[in-house]
Image: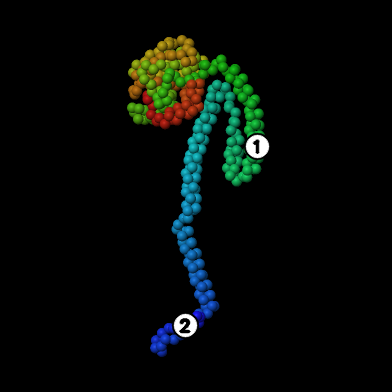
Amino acid sequence: MTMDKKKKIKFRYNPNTLRYESVKGKTVLQKAKRFISFLLFTLVISVIYYFVYSIFFDTLPEYSIKRENAIFAEHLDSLKSRYHKLSEVIDDISRRDTGIYNVIFESKPADVFADANSSSKELEILNRKTNNELIALTNRQLDELTATINKYSPIFDSMKNLIAAKKSGIDAIPSIVPVAGLNINSVGASVGNKMHPIYKQLNVHTGIDFAVSAGSEVIATASGKVKSVVTKQFSTGTEIIIDHENGYETRYLYLKKATVSKNERVKCGEVIGTVGNIGITIPHLHYEVRIDGKIADPLNYFFRDLSPKQLILFATISSDKGQSLD
């Protein structure tokens, strides 16, 4: 049995005629226009939503990138801080290195870091170079390093000759710590304007203090002849001055007693006395180095006892001490 498919007819009530009237269906063109309008409206809304969301909210990839950038920024600040600290340390080592050369070798050290600035500028643009360019740069730097080594080899040879020539008199140059078994925390203020412990006024401090227990052994920092042994009971206690007969003179103050006498010859490292409880503060040794009568910083004269790292630590601690012990 077959049934005729009847076309559905839609009716709409007309209030003017009070009758139901048939409604004609929309044409294909009308339907297409309606669909296109809906599509365009949806697209506009989507674009607006995307821009609003992208302005006020981060996508997961954007969030990850921003997080990585923040971490990199923290690392960069840390590296900058380390770079500045290392630069200060290198400058300090360079100054002390120059002082040691002037003292021992009576010459200026070779400037092996003369081309450091040009090398650092090349490193700044490494991230913009290709692998082939990096390989070429590395080869060039190796060639430059080889040339530098060849350049300074004669200087090192001449340095060995200088050491051999000066070896006989090196024991007469102050170069060790004047207190045996020194603890790094016992290092006090060095040369410079320091606060007086009682009067709280800035005074010129002419040596370096070592806060050690009473009775600690004091040793001669270089070979020489005892110039004087003086006892000032109510000021600096027993004071020993050694003339090293090369322009250098060392002084040891606030001793309880001396184990050497005037005009006696002493060797580098020999015990010359013991620390006393004489000063106005805690027991300590006040040690001075003078060259041709002028005050020198004793920190420059511990290079035989201390490593470069320990010297830097000594310098840091002593420079932080704004008050002397005497």
Across and down, in percent, residue 226 comes to 46, 13
Which residue is the site of mark 2? 9
- Judge from the rendering whether residue 184 lies leftward or rightward of residue 4; answer left or right: left
Q: Is residue 93 above or below residue 75?
A: above
Q: Is residue 41 visible?
A: yes
- Which residue is pictured at 50% across the width and 40% down the height? 79
Disc assigned to residue 139: 1
- Which residue is pictured at 39% across the width and 17% down the height? 216
Disc assigned to residue 319: none
Tell me the kind of residue under disc 1.
Asn
Across and down, in percent, residue 1 comes to 50, 80
In the foreground, 236 or 15: 15
Q: Secondary structure at mark 2?
A: loop
Quadrant of the rendered image containing residue 272: top left
- Which residue is pictured at 52% across the width and 72% down the height? 36
What crowding class fits label 2: few (fewer than 14 Cα within 10 Å), some (14-19), or many (20 or more)? few
- Judge from the rendering whether residue 303 lies leftward or rightward of residue 218; answer left or right: right
Q: Is residue 246 above or below residue 192?
A: above
- Which residue is pictured at 50% across the width and 25% down the height? 307
Q: Is residue 1 above or below residue 174?
A: below
Tell me the kind of residue under disc 2.
Ile
Across and down, in percent, residue 26 comes to 50, 80
What crowding class fits label 1: few (fewer than 14 Cα within 10 Å), some (14-19), or many (20 or more)? few
